[in-house]
Image: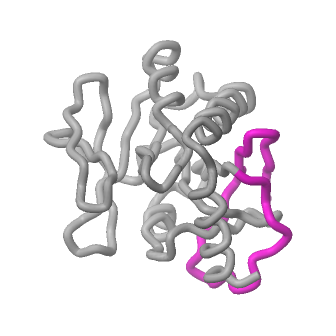
Amino acid sequence: MLKADIRRTFLARRRALSETEVQRRSALLSQQFFSNFPVDNWRWLHVFLPIAKQHEPDTWLIIHRIWAEFPQVQLAVPVMQADGHTLRHYQLTHDTPLATNRWGIPEPVEAEEMPPTVFDAVLVPLLACDEAGHRVGYGKGFYDRFLAQCRPEIQRIGLSLEPPITQIADVDSTDQPLTACITPEQVFRFR
């Protein structure tokens, strides 16, 4: 399938989910994450904050557990820049004030900026991924540009409410593949 078709199909499927079902699947994603990744070995984890109206996975479940059980792990979240093409990354703590931007994304206010090279792992938003670890997002390329700036050994972990599809037909050279994708049922790892 082509990215545009995948995007349309998976946006519709996600919007059809009830809030209860999104929460159920998000809880399973959180369990898979903590059961299958060496969180206690990481110094920095980059995590996206969910857009509730888009029924994105609720990453607050992961964030709150890290704060409670892994206080040595520092968190950072993205902030879309005014140019509409780039992300900057800011530390997220219990005390970080948040403001919702025009796209409905919570963003930190008055937080310390972090360079992409500090992160040990990035939780990557997506609509779908394929069996080779390629992903389809909202189509703006924010995460591909960001992941290209990170260290080569970084863990690029997708969070998906759905299992992978067989293949994305129109992968291009700037697409940054995932190293793993967590679904509610299992973790898929890619080379």
Residue 89 is situated, as x and y percent measured from the top left of the image, at 32, 50
Whether residue 33 sits left or right of residue 92 in the image: it is right
The vertical placement of 186 against 146, above or below, is: above
Could you say which is closer to the camera, residue 149 or residue 103?
103
Q: Is residue 177 magenta?
A: yes
Whether residue 78 sits left or right of residue 183 in the image: it is left
The vertical placement of 158 against 96, above or below, is: below
Q: Quadrant of the N terminus?
A: bottom right
- Residue drawn at the location 14% of the way across and 40% of the way down: 110
Location of residue 91 by image quarter: top left
The vertical placement of 45 against 101, above or below, is: above
- Residue drawn at the location 52% of the way across and 50% of the way down: 55
The reply to whether residue 9 is visible in this rendering is: yes
- Identify the image's colour scheme: rainbow, by chain, secondary structure or one colour: one colour
- Residue drawn at the location 46% of the way across and 13% of the way down: 68
Residue 46 is situated, as x and y percent measured from the top left of the image, at 45, 43
Report the label total: 0
Whether residue 84 sits left or right of residue 131 in the image: it is left
Q: Residue reaching furthest right?
A: 166
Could you say which is closer to the camera, residue 18 or residue 175?
18
Q: Residue reaching furthest top?
A: 69
Could you say which is closer to the camera, residue 13 or residue 71?
13
Residue 109 is situated, as x and y percent measured from the top left of the image, at 17, 42
The vertical placement of 63 against 105, above or below, is: above
Q: Which residues are magenta?
A: 162-191
Q: Is residue 21 magenta?
A: no
The reply to whether residue 88 is visible in this rendering is: no
Whether residue 84 sits left or right of residue 76 in the image: it is left
Location of residue 8 by image quarter: bottom right
The secondary structure that dominates the magenta segment is loop
- Residue drawn at the location 64% of the way across and 39% of the way down: 21
Residue 164 is situated, as x and y percent measured from the top left of the image, at 79, 59
